[in-house]
Amino acid sequence: MPIIEARNLRKTFAKTIAVDDVNLSIEEGEIFGILGPNGAGKTTTVECLTGMQKADSGHLRVLGLDPATHVADLRRQVGYQLQSTELPDAMRVGEAIDLFASFYPEPLQPAELLDTVGLSRLRKSAFGTLSGGEKQRLSIALALVGDPRIAVLDELTTGLDPQGRRDIWRLIDGIRHRGVTVVLVTHFLDEAQALCDRLAIVDQGRTIATGTPPELIAHAEMSAPGISQDARPVNLEDAYLAIIDSTVDAPEWKKTS
Amino acid sequence: MTALIALTRSEATLLSRNPTAIFMALLFPAALLLMQGLVIPGTDALIGGDDPIFARLRTIDLFVPIALTVALGSVSLTNFPSAIGGYREKGVLRRLATTPVGPHRVLFAQVIISGLSLVAGAVIAVLAAMVLLHAQAPQSALLVTGIFVLAAIQMLAVGSLIAARASSAQNANGIGMLVFFASLFTAGVWTPGPMMPEPLQQISGFTPLGAASQALTAGWYGQPVPLVPIVAMSLWTIVLILLAVRTFRWC
Ligand SMILES: Nc1ncnc2c1ncn2[C@@H]1O[C@H](COP(=O)(O)OP(=O)(O)O)[C@@H](O)[C@H]1O
Ligand SMILES: [Mg+2]
């Protein structure tokens, strides 16, 4: 049984269709990417999955529970790093992690976790003095401190410099062995390719393709058969662009694998 | 419970690192009172007049219960709503909503810390008044304490309504300061108690901090406690809490 399942998820805000028809099936222990351009509906999708928003329609199951009705259970088992959260500037790194640990019944050891994310040295530093990358590492630690079965990480590396992004990638790769299922929301292709076991491409509120990075590349080749040999997609970026383009030209090609 | 304790401790720590908030909570009420007593000329003279109680008091004596309202207002209307406005602005309320404790606990924690800090500010002001201005102790400490507690709940309710809507710390602080200075006027910081023109005094008695001021003054100097301010404060408390709960923006 998949640990997260979404079928025909739909969510609208007044006039905006944020999520039109999203379908996901995420297996336990994988790093699953939700990839798509800005405004595609990625954040709204994970907000529905985590019970932060109520879906208009569709079938959702997270850890076998309906997020709309079992929000309290899910809060304990799902760590969610929001797309944009700050902490009070004066709060210190060590205080933040201890505080969040106190929210959960069986938290991880704060000190060890800080070590894992490379912030032990900064225990006494105020949040306001941290660099962007350090803030994101703390944010990941806060999402993991409750020892969740699922961690949802939204736009982890947006705004970081290349070095900072590589550091975060290494960190995510490192938590793979903990058995936490990671849902990684991103609009960066290189990030999705580097980290994700499988991913879904979301565009204009719809999942337009799902698979491993190699599968998506192969898929894109098939969907663009007329293309000359040297223009064939050889990496995820080419595949992504080909898939997004092909849905514009051929709207019937929308089925998720 | 552990989460609430941890959040309360964290709020206290953050307060201890915020010099502006410490000043507003602990020093401003006493500083204003000492300025009225030691810097403004003539406040040491007897009031005189026909009122049997007030005739024997100095003007500065009237400012002592008013200093309590300054402590009530400065914490409830500035520190408290700015803290919550800041949490909304930074996404802290939303972040807490993703955890098992939820965002309402940080509100409780902030109310606890605000309550403690406004009591501390009031105690400091009263001690300063007794030591440096030779002010009288209240006629009935119990009555004054009771009125103070009601007034504190009421003023935190006013602050909650600001906190419920403010989009940022700055926004909350702007609205809070405006309400604070208007409230200080009705509380009699510029024209204390019996020196206020009669109609103004009556209108002030219906405002939150004006009612607090009149009730505290009456309790402090052994007048019969007027019922109107007590009823006004109780009604404000109920209405404002309901309004704040209904309009609170959790994100
Ligand atoms: N709370 C909201 N109210 C109104 N519109 C929203 C809200 N949240 C998202 N949207 C809109 O829904 C669309 C999808 O947004 P979002 O899920 O944040 O996309 P993404 O995370 O892929 O960038 C956008 O057009 C956005 O403006
Ligand atoms: Mg987003």
Image: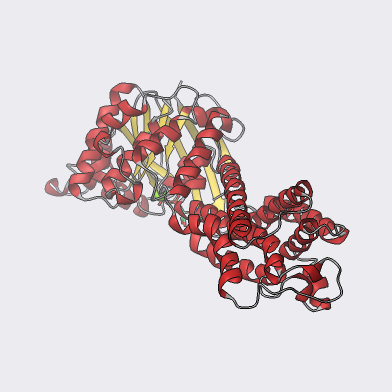
Identify the image quadrant of residue B55. Answer: bottom right
Left or right? Give the position of A247 relative to A173.
Answer: right
Instruction: Identify the residue shown where x is 34% and y is 22%.
Output: A179
Is residue B115 shown above or below A183?
below
Asked whether, in this view, residue B91 is left or right of residue A69, the answer is left
**Residue A132 left/right relative to A207:** left
What x and y, as percent, mark residue B31?
54, 64
* Image quarter in which the C terminus of chain A is found: top left
Rendered position, A10 above or below B47: above
Q: Nearer the viewer, residue B163 or B20?
A: B20
Across and down, in percent, residue B26 comes to 54, 55
Report the front residue among A103 and B141: B141
Total marks in image: 0
Identified at 57% across, 31% down, the residue is: A72
Q: Is residue B14 visible?
A: yes
Look at 68% across and 56% down and name the residue there.
Answer: B155
**Residue B178 in sight here:** no
Residue A33: image x %, image y %? 34, 37
| A123, above or below B71, in the image | above
Q: How is the image coloured?
A: secondary structure
